Amino acid sequence: MANLNDGDNWTSIKIIPSTHNSGAIKPLDGCSCIPWFWAKCQNVNIMDQLNIGIRGFDFRLINYSNDIFIGHTLISNLTKQSIFDTFKSFLKENPSEFIFVFIKEDWATRKEWNFNKVQKFWNSLIKIDDYSNGYNNTIFMDPKVNIKDVIIKHLRGKLILIPDNRFNHYVNTSLKVEVGTLPMDFFNVCNTWSSGDMNSAKETILQFIEKKCKKENTDATPNDIITLNNMYNIIQLNVVVLKGCLPPYFVSYKMNKWFRGYLQNNQNKALGFVCVDYATESLIKDMVC
């Protein structure tokens, strides 16, 4: 992000390397290591993901033991506090960077997220970085700012939250949210998880790119290079294979290898957020180079 032009709109960024189920790394309960193999989606911790170039994160939240944990059906050993502390530390040390964070309730425990618990989550963010006296020196954006149209200069050092489902205050307007966010309806989303097999998932991705992703126009200004309908794209490479019998590790090995091959032959597409399981530094370099 440091090398991007300050004056360009952030939506001119052709690709933002992202992880799917970013916090599904290690289980809270060490005895669940065998079933965790089917929940695990990443191999490296959050700071290491940041250091290899991940700038989009996907977290599923679970209420457990009077705390908020990150989960993927099973509970990980990461808490909301720990991941936000990591983001804050990284942004303070790297003020030219910025991070996008997708949040929603974990599906298995979604019914536990009533209005009060969701509101408590939003209220707790002031303890991460106190914005009561303004947002300039915090990692959060002012909620009055329309982030859709913000130039890169004004995102540097910031954390941009993208809430979905029960956390989506654009739908649940009774929620009081005091930090800047982006609405999910700003995005074209290519979901592949229910494709059934890897070949179908690949075809879904290729069709999505053909319909939704513009090629870079060398005669255009950077701000003209944006996805169709003034929406930004999200492409997910994860897919449930054999009704979930095949763990994400094996699926991601094949899908990531295929996508790297695609990137080598298609370097002028504005793909948006590309969310992968088991992200590696070499894969991320292929995305951004």
Image (spheres, helix red, strand yellow):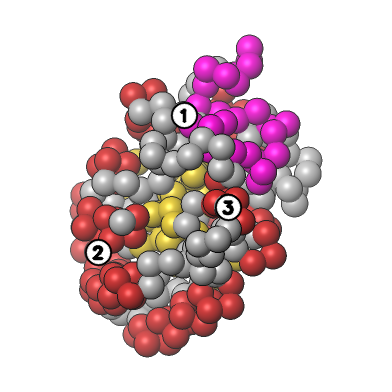
Task: Work out how far the residue at label 1 is from the one at label 2, CA to CA, in angstroms.
Answer: 34 Å
> Is 272 a magenta residue?
no
Q: Is residue 239 visible?
A: yes
> Is 152 a magenta residue?
yes
Front disc: 2 or 3: 3
User: In terms of sequence position, does the residue under pointer 1 or pointer 3 come before the other?
Assistant: 1
Return the x and y of residue 204 as percentages of the image width and height: 48, 81
Query: Do the residues under discs 1 and 2 have CB atoms within 8 angstroms?
Result: no
Instruction: Kindly identify which residue carries mark 1.
Output: 157
At x 64% / y 60%, what residue is drawn?
231
Instruction: Kindly identify which residue carries mark 3.
Output: 221
Q: Residues within 10 Å of mark 3 (few under 14, many from 20)?
A: few
| Lateral position of residue 117 relative to residue 286, left or right | right
Between 197 and 76, the one lying in front of the other is 197
Task: Work out how far the residue at label 1 is from the one at label 3, CA to CA, in angstroms.
Answer: 25 Å
Which segment did they paint magenta? 131-156
At x 58% / y 78%, what residue is drawn?
211
Return the x and y of residue 185 as percentages of the image width and height: 68, 58
Circle 1: residue type: Gly
Instruction: Kindly identify which residue carries mark 2.
Output: 37
Return the x and y of residue 103 as percentages of the image width and height: 53, 48
Question: Which quadrant is home to the C terminus?
Answer: bottom left
Return the x and y of residue 180 as percentages of the image width and height: 63, 35
Q: Is residue 251 visible?
A: no
Query: Do the residues under discs 2 and 3 have CB atoms within 8 angstroms?
Result: no
| Lateral position of residue 266 relative to residue 257, left or right | right
Between 156 and 76, the one lying in front of the other is 156
Instruction: Kindly state the secondary structure of the residue where label 2 is placed.
Output: helix
User: In terms of sequence position, does the residue under pointer 1 or pointer 2 come before the other?
Assistant: 2
